[in-house]
Structure formats: structure tokens, C-alpha cells
Image (cartoon, rainbow, N blue to C red):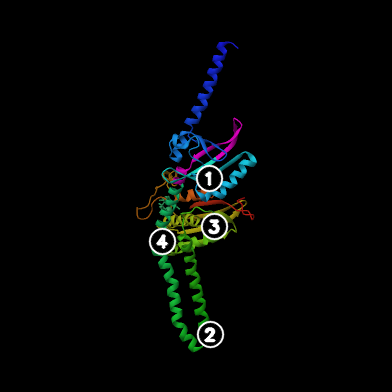
Amino acid sequence: MSRGSENSQYAALLAQERFVRAFFEESSVGLNLCRMDGHWLESNRAFLDIIGYAADEADDGKLTYWQLTPRKYDAQEAEQLARLSATGKYGPYEKEFIRKDGSLVPVRLNGFVIEVGGEKMIWSFIEDLSSQRELETERLKAIHGSKLAALGEMAASIAHEINTPLAIISAFAFTLPGSIAAGDQALITEALTEIQRAVERAGAITAGLRRLSRGTAKSAFEPVELKTVITEAMGLAAARTRAEGLVLELDLKTTAMVQGNGVQLLQVLLNLVNNAVDAVKGAAIRQLAVRARDEGAFAEVIVEDTGPGIAPEHAGRLFDRFFTTKEPDEGTGLGLSISRDIVQSMHGTLTWDRVGDRTRFMVRLPRMTPAGAPS
Ligand SMILES: Nc1ncnc2c1ncn2[C@@H]1O[C@H](COP(=O)(O)OP(=O)(O)OP(=O)(O)O)[C@@H](O)[C@H]1O
Ligand SMILES: [Mg+2]
């Protein structure tokens, strides 16, 4: 081999080494090489930033994977280690690292085994999930804020709505002793039936309230019976629909279970109904229809009103955050944007349309198959 070609091969090797180095150093994903026992040999800048250490504090075996792993992950770590020895790969899985300042940083990891100079080592890819988690926290805060606003708006009418059955119960309870003394079976039966009905009416409202007051803070999904949530929403909205003198058409032909967060789904329906009630306020014909049906793999909920509809210049902005045509104390303009966000997180859609003289909003959600997985 001539001197010249040796030189160029060496140059090529050097270039390759430099290329790989640059790739390693400049990657925005954390990269790390460690021994099978967890001693870290080399980390790139991105990974050092994630854990908050300098290179000379972390590399060449000064730190171990285990020192920076909270004990609560022991079981998952054992599982990943078993995968690593069985398949030569681990992850992707999510955990936290303990940073130098003691704080925890959420990360997603995956990696594989390589052999370097006869020794088995682990290459890992580490993604920082902090900003992703912050976004999720922000999202949940927005949902929570909008829920509180909706509750505040409805509080007065809900209190009134519960007071009506209470007044009925109180009136019949007052007459009962007289009817019992007189032995009037017909009056006694009537009083008890009316009391029972009033208790059910108040119960429908408190069931919705109870669900709404459950935390939105966790985004945990569970199987939810769609019809129950619609009924609860209508119970809560009844106060307003009655106060506005609305003609209500309720047609719930669904047996669907959907995968989601019941509190958030209730919020979506309440917002659609509240929007419809707001819309028909000044209208000559004041009707509200809420219908649900199962359509193949989906369940649909339709909320339709006879209000004036949506002006063409507003149509494109309905789902924008803070878009509202209402007075500041009547609306924040968050309802639809948060509702669409919630429905999409359940893999569904929220759309609207003008059908004849009615404004129609439609929620479409994938139904769960009996086995439990969304179909
Ligand atoms: N059924 C409807 N008929 C007519 N306009 C509607 C209807 N639903 C929504 N809109 C319009 O869309 C806008 C945005 O609705 P959205 O629910 O996002 O906010 P909002 O009701 O104004 O306030 P918030 O829900 O936060 O209290 C409303 O201000 C209204 O102009
Ligand atoms: Mg609204």
C-alpha cells in the first residue's frame, strides 16, 4: 500500500470518527454508554444536561445508573433487565432520574447491548419528557379551570333546581301526619309517591355534581357508560333549560361504553348544552334536542338547537381558545376548544353543522368492544 493511500485511508477514518463524534455530541437526544453493571462510561451533552452533571463528574465510571434511579422503579428495572438479557434490547419505557440538584426528571429510555473489545456494554437513548409533561399539566389545568367556571355559572340555577324537590318533600311531609291520623290511604300513597319522585329528581342532579367534583387532575381513562353521562349532564342542565322555557327533546338510543375520563366527558356535554341554551335565549322558537345513537364502531351524541346559528365570519374561529361572542361574565371562549381537546384525547371528533333551521354539534366516539379495547 502506497504512503498516499494509507494517508487517505487514515484521513477517511479520522473523518468518520469525527463524524460519529459530532453525531454523538450534537444529538439532542441523550446518549450514553454504560457497563452491564450500570457504571457510566460516556455521556453526550444532551444526557449530561438532563441529569445536571458535568462530564468529569459522570463519565469513566464515576456515576452509576443505579445511583440516579429512584428505588420506586426497582420492579420495572428488573423487568427491563430481563428483556435486555433475553433479547439484547430494552425499552422504550418511562421513568425518572434523580438530577444532581435532587430534583426528578421524567425520561423515556431505550437501548441495546453492543460488544466493545470483547466486553458487553449498553447503549442507551434518553429523551427528556419534562416539557411534554408540562404541556399535559397545562392542559389539565385549563380543563380544570373551565370546569370551575362552568360550575360557578350553574351554581345558582342548580341550587334552585334542588330547592324545588326539597319544597315538594317538605310540603308533603307536612301533610303526612294529618293523612295518617285520618287513615286516608289515597293521600298517604300520593304523598309518598311525590316524595319519592322529588328525591329522584334531586338525586339526578347530585349524581352529576358528584361526578363533576371528582378530580380532573388525573387524566386516567376508564370505561364510561355514555348514556349515564348524558343523563347526568341533562340533570345538571335541567335548571337552565327550565328557567329559559325550552322545549327539550331527549332521545338516547345508545348502550355504548366509551374509553375516557367521565368527568371530562360530562364537561364536554355540559358545554354543548349550555352553548345551545345560550343560543336560543332570544329566539322565537326555543327547542333543544339531545340525541344519542350507536353507529357501528362509533357512538354519536347530537346537541341541536333552534338558535340563530353561527355567523359565517365566526365559523372558522369557533374552536379557537378564548373565541367568544358572549359578555366577559357569560363566557370565556374556552368551552369548545377544551371540549374538542377532550374528545380528541378519546380518539373521537367534535364537529358542527347547520341542519335546516338548527345548529347541530356532534360528538363521535369510538365504542369499546365487549372485551374492553376500543374497537
Ligand atoms: N349552539 C351554538 N349556536 C350559536 N353559536 C354558538 C353555539 N355554540 C357555540 N357558539 C359560538 O361559539 C363561541 C365559542 O363557544 P365556546 O363554548 O368555546 O365559548 P363560550 O360559550 O363563549 O364560553 P365558555 O364556554 O368558555 O363559557 C360562542 O361564544 C358562540 O359565539
Ligand atoms: Mg361554551
Is 28 placed above or below 364 here?
Answer: above
Q: Are marks 3 and 2 in contact (CB under 8 Å)?
A: no
Question: Of callouts 1 and 4, which one flags the residue occurring earlier in the amino acid sequence?
Answer: 1
Q: Secondary structure at mark 1?
A: strand
Label disc, if present, on residue 185 of the rendered structure: 2
Q: Are marks 3 and 4 in contact (CB under 8 Å)?
A: no
Q: Kindly identify which residue carries mark 3.
A: 291
Q: Kindly identify which residue carries mark 1.
A: 94
The amino acid type found where label 4 is placed reads Met
The amino acid type found where label 2 is placed reads Gln
Q: CA distance from mark 2 to mark 1?
A: 67 Å
Of residues 56 and 238, the one drawn nearer to the viewer in this rendering: 56
Q: CA distance from mark 1 to mark 4?
A: 40 Å
Does the closest atom of ligand 1 sit within 8 Å of the Cβ of label 1? no
Question: Of callouts 3 and 4, which one flags the residue occurring earlier in the amino acid sequence?
Answer: 4
* Image quarter of the N terminus: top right
